[in-house]
Image (tube, coloured by chain):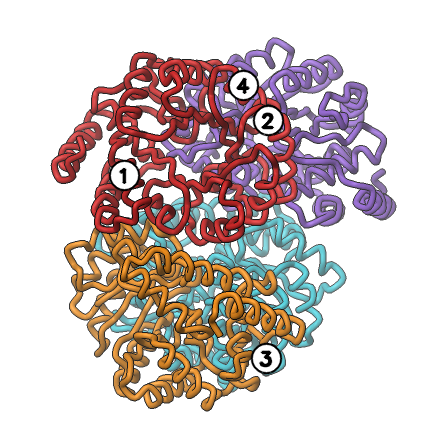
Chain colours: A purple, B cyan, C red, D orange
Amino acid sequence: MITPLTHKSTLDERGLGRLVEHLISGGVHGLFILGTTGEGPALPRSLQVEVIRQTCRQVAGRAPVIVGVTDTVLESAVELATKAKELGAQAVVTSAPYYYAASQAELLAYLENLAAAVPLPVFLYNAPSNTHHTFDPATVRSAADIPNIVGLKDSGCDMIYFHRVRESLRNHPEFTLLVGPEELMAEAVLLGGHGGMCAGSNIWPRLYVELYNAAAASDLDAVRRLQSSVMRLSTTVYRMNGRESSLLRGMKCAVAELGICDDGMMPPFEPFGEAERTGIRQYLAELGRDSGHE
Amino acid sequence: MITPLTHKSTLDERGLGRLVEHLISGGVHGLFILGTTGEGPALPRSLQVEVIRQTCRQVAGRAPVIVGVTDTVLESAVELATKAKELGAQAVVTSAPYYYAASQAELLAYLENLAAAVPLPVFLYNAPSNTHHTFDPATVRSAADIPNIVGLKDSGCDMIYFHRVRESLRNHPEFTLLVGPEELMAEAVLLGGHGGMCAGSNIWPRLYVELYNAAAASDLDAVRRLQSSVMRLSTTVYRMNGRESSLLRGMKCAVAELGICDDGMMPPFEPFGEAERTGIRQYLAELGRDSGHE
Amino acid sequence: MITPLTHKSTLDERGLGRLVEHLISGGVHGLFILGTTGEGPALPRSLQVEVIRQTCRQVAGRAPVIVGVTDTVLESAVELATKAKELGAQAVVTSAPYYYAASQAELLAYLENLAAAVPLPVFLYNAPSNTHHTFDPATVRSAADIPNIVGLKDSGCDMIYFHRVRESLRNHPEFTLLVGPEELMAEAVLLGGHGGMCAGSNIWPRLYVELYNAAAASDLDAVRRLQSSVMRLSTTVYRMNGRESSLLRGMKCAVAELGICDDGMMPPFEPFGEAERTGIRQYLAELGRDSGHE
Amino acid sequence: MITPLTHKSTLDERGLGRLVEHLISGGVHGLFILGTTGEGPALPRSLQVEVIRQTCRQVAGRAPVIVGVTDTVLESAVELATKAKELGAQAVVTSAPYYYAASQAELLAYLENLAAAVPLPVFLYNAPSNTHHTFDPATVRSAADIPNIVGLKDSGCDMIYFHRVRESLRNHPEFTLLVGPEELMAEAVLLGGHGGMCAGSNIWPRLYVELYNAAAASDLDAVRRLQSSVMRLSTTVYRMNGRESSLLRGMKCAVAELGICDDGMMPPFEPFGEAERTGIRQYLAELGRDSGHE
């Protein structure tokens, strides 16, 4: 879930309320807040807490709320996780500290320390393009033996990695394997993964719910048809300009364009200008017309 | 297809004959020689020609023979492709010249020049881990308009890339989309790709043929079972030691262990020693026992 | 400057006092705290503030204190910089937020916003191996026009980059150009740079002061002799084991071995064990004997 | 040395004659042909041989001729080296085969095999941006014990690496340490290296000869002045457009602009068009006016 922000870097509370309803009415199975898409690492602590509080209040138990707590400081991650439990969240997601390079043994020790101190179930977050760490399959396998580490969100975009992890955990079906990039969710589920955390749900939640359902039901005709919509969104709205931030800015702009919330962003990012916004609007109209998503 | 070599860097002709029969009796739909797995770029020209000649002679029309002609010199690539046609091959595979970094415009111009001079159908070869070039989806899309460029072998290990290419060519169903890494063939086919060039076929061709058939028939139970065998081979035989050459050396060793051909290798590589060979033997026995492949 | 920590992740206050005296009596021209070597990004805010407070108190005006404030949250960076001024520091060092990839325009806008809000002179910190951003020479050139951006600490290890920046700023001699890695300080100064921030000073401050003086005085015989000591330290103490954290752990271990402070480290790192410590001790003895540094 | 080519990919023989005279009259200490700048890996074998023959004939013993023989096939590298000796060259330069990733042990074994078969002194060529291999300092150190391996040309752009190699070979002063990028030659020599192979010599050989002389004589004022010219050339002529080939195309264009030879290029590159050529002309005029090089 993106974090609805005003252009003054404050929480767009009413937007957040509408966004939660948009997602839940779209049928999502849970909400992941303060992740990469949620600008979690760019938000001051007070805003992070506010996002958890407002989201949990709005959701009111209708779906699990999962909170990203990745931090460069162990103590801060634990602190946020503790707060998340207090405010009613169901689980947390964490990567390793992302400023320093570290060995797999150090990453595993970190996970052990963190899990021992965190009062909620923990999902690992493999996100090398942001954290510049990868949890080796053997590290994931070892981490799966830690009692409250319950799954992996793999955003590494490397399906061979995903299959290696899955193969090494085939006797641990209770360990949940999710993929991050929505473009890979279908094949992950078709080959035995458990689901995805699809950022595009902020725009059209039903598309991803239907894609998941089709993959889970082995309905390949539907999978291919829906995957085509996923790819068209991915190659238009997320690539509005060639800049590194085009995915995040495009997504926020699209959600704003749908009238759901404001498109403020935390530094170093800024909302799209009018030219790009017009482009996003046209893309949405075109994609919505072709695919029936609106 | 690997290139069977003696320990004196000469062609193991009888081994090549046995390997071709092993593959054809395993049901493969075609043979790809002189690719990355075939040590094509490490073979002197005379040996390259000998491999084409012997393979075409042995195959004798029972399956198409596709020849890797990637070279750093345009003229040499064209020369080898011309020779390949003369010797009876059906198509060639080429990447861009791989010593210099080049822009997409330069890569496309190169492909145009090459295709115009080559008397056979051409498959593009996207192989960034070896060539350090990637053909952008837009470049592939443009190349697809060149008459004798007929398909893409994508060894980039990036399924989002593969889906982007597929989406951009959805109105060109005659353009053949294959994946390189065998670990990704199933999902590529499930989502609309046309097949794979699976190096593991050198060991157990039937495994990959069955996996392809299962994926093409949307038989997901079979896909998951066979994919598990594929992953076990991939995480054992191909990772015998931690060195960069472990995939190629492991594969050659496994094929030698099956009694098919010698395991000589071109510099800078050398065959596995006895310790590693024993390990490969054990892996094969274990995997063969569990999966029924032998 | 490293951050002296106990094995319980608390500040080793007496160690910090000794370390400051060690550095000042070694002749350093300033102290840089809470940088990469100082584990700045791994310290909770309260500890960061404590480090600034204790260091400024101990230094008591004998040398400028420069504070690393790099953060993924603009507001937090500004907050720490404000606190640094309050506690008596002379300048701050900042990179761009390091979780998200960003364009040069976004990095420059960030620097403008940060500089406008920070009440101290600001040094840019180019540290791609940790932040995975590089400030392009043109970005540095533009940032140099912002009034309180006064210099660059370049830890990119790319001397062509450094020369490009220097050339583009040759009409701005008041803009201070420092290099991060101590192995490159001599050549930077010989070719017109202004100095370095040498982590090895924590061990043998006089070595780096003498090397700077020799380079500034164009005494090439001395430069070569001292550079040899620098390289021997760099290839032994900083590479005790092959792990990613060997530089930082080796340095902390060496300083502890000299009796200056405890070698506690923040997660995900841990102090060296006895075997590695013995190795460090031997290196120090050998290097000290050969070079006269002790 | 660049390879003068016509626009039909044939050797510009008269241009090559003029270029050799330009270099020798500029005072260079040797000529390096068929390297990266010489488009060696993109030239067919017959053209490579022709370049060696014509260059040796024109030089006629006035300076050593050193030949790049890097190839993906060991046998081909040896063959070219043998031919080079026959035609009168004094040494060869080689990297490791550059298509496959390989371990340091494999790289070292390759160098041993190559050196044993080559009838000339051999320089190692560390060129990771083109070959995607790095010779570890320990590998260079071991290779230095092979009788006819006599030096290293380091084009890795990493001066810490260069200093590590130099330190490890400080008891082997007869092993020649050269840097590739002209921007780093001065500091390499100031700190104890032996020289550089400066591609910019194709344009203004005297600039690099003077810079070398100034560095060798420890004349830092002259070094800084000349280095400034080097950097201005590097940031203008070599960066005419943002494409990957801008260095090579800019250099060829500049040499053609000076009336020395034609600017044909091997695929996948093409000469600059008129707009870029005008830009190069202006840069040369400006730089020549400011620096006295013309």
Which numbered tag is attached to residue B120?
A: 3
**Kind of residue at badge 3:** Leu
| Kind of element beneath mark 3 | loop
Q: Same chain for marks 2 and 4?
A: no
Residue ID for mark 4: A121
Reading the image, the residue beneath label 1 is C239
Question: Are discs 4 and 1 less than 8 Å apart at CB?
Answer: no
Q: Label 4 marks which chain's residue? A: A
Rendering quarter of residue A187: top right
Mark-to-mark CA distance, 4 and 1: 37 Å
Residue A249: give x, y in percent of width and height. Answer: 71, 38
**Which is more foreground, mark 4 or mark 1?**
1
Q: CA distance from mark 1 to mark 2?
A: 33 Å
Question: Subunit of mark 1?
Answer: C
Could you tell me which residue is drawn at 36 percent across and 85 percent down? D55
The chain ID associated with circle 2 is: C
Give how far apart the Cα atoms at labels 1 and 3 are: 54 Å
Single out the mark in the foreground, 1 or 2.
2
In the rendered structure, the answer to whether residue B218 lies left or right of residue D197 reads right
Residue D5 sits above or below residue A146 on the image: below
Q: Are marks 1 and 3 on the same chain?
A: no
- Spatial separation of the CA atoms under disc 3 and disc 2: 57 Å
Q: Residue B40: in sight, yes or no?
A: no
User: Total label count?
Assistant: 4
